[in-house]
Amino acid sequence: MERLVIKGGTALKGEIEINGAKNAAVAILPAAILASSGECVIDNIPNIEDVHCLERILGVLGCEVEKLGENTLKINATKMTSVNACTEHGSRMRASYYFIGALLSRFKEARVDLPGGCPIGVRPIDQHIKGFEALGAKVSIEHGTISVKAEKLVGANIFFDVVSVGATINLMLAATLAEGTTTLENVAKEPHVVDVANFLNSMGADVKGAGTDVIRIKGVKDLKGCNYSVVPDQIEAGTFMIAAAATKGDVTLTNVIPKHLESISAKLIEMGVNIEEGDDTIRVFVDKQLKGINIKTSPYPGFPTDVQQPMCSLLSSVEGRSLIVETIWESRHQHVDELKKMGASIKVEGRTAIIDGTDKLTGAVVKATDLRAGAAMVIAGLIAEGSTEICSIEHIDRGYPRIEEKFKSLGANISRVQR
């Protein structure tokens, strides 16, 4: 079993290039099956396990998938042979549900295993189902599989009861080839939602309003292949920003969109971190004592839930008391027990983590309880005294390409070992 071993105490310094966004890529790859003619060549795809799972599912469906480079895929979906995406790969990850919207849109039928993913709380798909039914589909769930079928799809007005990234994207996919116009209200506004809309439009879809509260999709007859580059990863960038601050380092991130990182930058600046923005770069450096702050997660443009766990590691090592209120997922404080093994002083009350900064963290054997918790453990290991060993790193590999190599390039003492 692979583990990460980190010897802490080194300030990160240098330049690091941020990969394409995981949360965009895992929706764009299923969306590629909407192209009934031509090929989709998609660049800036992160080389992560979730992407590899989607590649395998595309192959099962009859798509031709060719790797043109480490971060580039060519997908030809013109000769698809199946609408059954029920495979062991799909049940391991959350994003497999995007095949429902894409298959339903093009073939009016889909079968997909109910998705897995990180154990961070109840993640229902009721808003997805509500939307599919509004478009005219019949939905059934049996033995852990969701089946969706329609004679035809007709545009509708759909108001989401809660803001949901997954439902927003899935209904965009389903509505692209529906008759008439679909209006989605109370939608998610995250950068990866906008990126998926841009990808669909590059294939010939008519999607307007992505990034606002209302998205309108005018159905078209068919979509064709295109060339596209995935947006930079807001969450990976945030993770490296926090790591730079935690180690009191000096790191410049390239291939970023500073606008997407404003909520993270604002909180780091509030702590005393220095942030310098360029057109597509951000420099993060520390030259003074940092202080505790309060954070409340919320949908974009608020502070991302995916970044609060890495931020928890940073706040565990700074002066004063901090609060993190998690409003998105009810079980996203599982990493706290692991941080406590390293000497962190954290108390969880409901969805609030109360953090009292300590003089030092010490190395220990800890577990990556989920993807972003794994990133939090890496950051804790980078600042801890002594050696930290992180197990269950398959969670980390789902979202961070070659994380140890990227941190090594910044001077970290980190290695991947077999135990």
Image (spheres, rainbow, N blue to C red):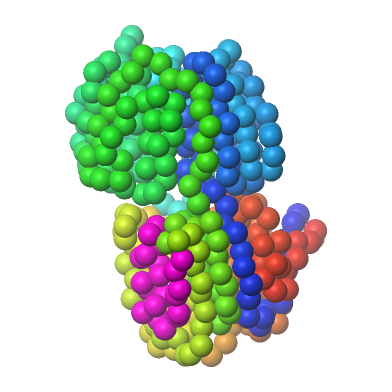
Q: Quadrant of residue 300?
A: bottom left
Q: Which residue shows up at 38% across the image and 42% down it? A: 193
Residue furthest to the front in view is 279
Residue furthest to the top in view is 151
Q: Is residue 80 left or right of residue 321?
A: right
Residue furthest to the right in view is 418
Q: Is residue 263 magenta?
A: yes
Range of residues picked out in magenta: 259-278
Q: Is residue 56 left or right of residue 227?
A: right
Q: Is residue 108 left or right of residue 408?
A: left
Give the percent coordinates (x, y) of residue 76: 59, 21
Out of 78 and 131, give the one closest to the viewer: 78
Q: Is residue 200 visible?
A: yes
Q: Which residue shows up at 61% across the image and 18% down it? A: 62
* Residue 25 position (above or below residue 287): above
* Residue 122 position (above or below residue 61): below
Quadrant of the frame with the N terminus: bottom right
